[in-house]
Image (cartoon, coloured by chain):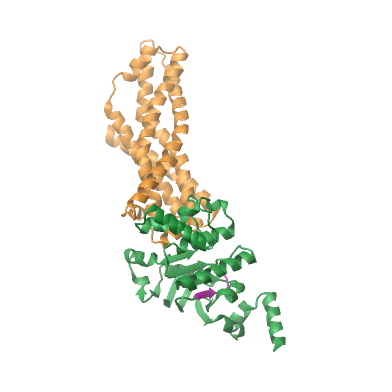
Chain colours: A orange, B green
Amino acid sequence: MMLRLVFSQPEQFKVYRKRTFDEIETIGLNSIGIVAILSVFMGAVIALQTASNMDSPFLPKYTIGYITRSSTILEFSPTIISLILAGKVGSNVASEIGTMRVTEQIDALDIMGVNSASFLILPKILASVLFFPFLIIFSMGLSLMGGYVAVVSSGLCSHEDYVFGIRAFFVVGNISYALIKTMCFAFLIVSVSSFYGYYTKGGALDVGKSSTQGVVWSSITILLTNFVLTQLILL
Amino acid sequence: MIEVKEVNKTFGDNHVLKDFSATFQEGKVNLIIGQSGQGKSVLTKCIVGLMEVDEGQVLYDGRDFSSMTRKQRKEIRKEIGMLFQGSALFDSMTVEENIMFPLDMYTNMTKKEKIDRANFCLERVNLEGRNNLLPAECSGGMQKRIAIARAISMNPKYLFCDEPNSGLDPRTSILIDNLIKEITYEYNITTVVITHDMNSVMEIGDTVVFINQGQSWWSGDKSSILSTENQEVVDFVYASSFMKNLKGALNAKK
């Protein structure tokens, strides 16, 4: 019901376009910092743990780079970063829309004849679906760099072995898989959080509850969708 | 003119509006008064379409708003301005952007024309030069005036005000009341004001509808409300000691 309203014809295309660019800044560009920090340390930890678990002398050192790359591209960047973004973006979206609901700003839009669901939610969905893939590609790069710095600087792996590892047995389809997942997660984060925000009733306390529910349910749907998409695409 | 005909609205077992009928005149300030919890806000939401009526009709100059589709209602909504109790200004937008918002959505005016219109509306509410402030930087009275400026930006035919002076000091309340009155007469708007403030009734009311238990209990003009013998209206009007003293003084004068 809500999504039908969201995807109905916009009143003024140029207003929606401007709002979409504003949302790209709020939802996307403002998340670069946290994505960067998380990705660097995530890559570093994956590489160090892989190195510390390589007991067999028969395993080549480039395996560290190979496993870091595979786990980063297939799972850590698209899923873990999306879960983190569910917390940051999801709570932001649910609380923003929820506050607009309890302060009658959504009623004001409705009385003006504006499709409030579409006006508020569609630009956020477009912004996240368009921009999250770039964030995830950025995260992949930083994660691999974090792994490189961690293992090369600590002497667990040479520069050549690590670089060979991250290039070995590369499957381009894995990137597509990761980006398809990311776009689905982006849609889920914003639509689920918006749903809880849009149907908030009450006051400030209820805005807080909507925000929490938005984050919890978008995280759960991300995990379920991840399972289904992995079955469908990879197997 | 807005006509409300035998409107009913229930929430579960709670029958909030019972065959409510009233007529709100063009070019006049029409007040809906009554105690809290008697259905004033539900009635307003039914009139402006934020809630659907269960039975009955809401007619805007003869156009049956209650039976229209969402798309058909849009045309009437462009003719409606509303001043909310909490102002409901968009807090991510500046004062100017708030006022220009309906123009952005529904007109093909150039940016300069829209800015000129916003400036005109701001001047009308005595807030010229405040274009770039955010709503959070404005006082309660200023926010109400900005909301009025936004409401009149599209030259509305109908203006709804939900408790326009709640939370304001007496002087600012009178200022807002007078602004509503002036705008109503100036642009010949059908204005509907929901209030339980007797000062507003005496200051700006042309016609008054008293709502009690979801029904149109009494209607008349502001002078007849002071002399009515309808007990519920009398209890409401003379609830404060100030009004009781005023009544005593008037009776002594007689």
**Residue range (magenta):** B29-36
* Residue B152 on image: x %, y %: 46, 64
Residue sitting nearer the eye, B166 or A221: B166
> Going by the picture, which residue comes out furthest to the bottom?
B254
For the point 45% across and 46% down, the residue is A93
For the residue pair A162 and B79, the one nearer the viewer reads as B79
Residue drawn at x 41%, y 44% is A22
Question: Residue B113 appears in which quarter of the rendering?
Answer: bottom left
Task: Check the image and report above or below for B109 versus A221.
Answer: below
Q: Residue at x 71, y 79 (%)?
A: B245
Most distant residue in the top direction: A57
Query: Does the magenta-highlighted stretch encompass residue A126?
Result: no
Quarter in which the C terminus of chain A is drawn: top left
Look at the picture and state if B216 lies above or below A174: below
Residue A31 sits above or below residue A92 on the image: above
Asked if residue A52 shows in the view, the reply is no
- Secondary structure, magenta segment, majority class: strand
Query: Looking at the rendering, in which quadrant would you find the N terminus of chain A?
Result: bottom left
Hey, which quadrant is residue B58 in on the image? bottom left
Tell me if I can see residue A94 in this picture. yes
Give left or right: position of B236 versus A123: right
Q: What x and y, as percent, mark residue A50?
A: 42, 19
* Residue A172 in the image, given as x and y percentages of width and height: 27, 27
Q: Is residue A169 left or right of residue A84?
A: left
Q: Nearer the viewer, residue B130 or A133?
A: B130
Residue at the spot 42% in from the left edge and 18% down from the top edge: A148
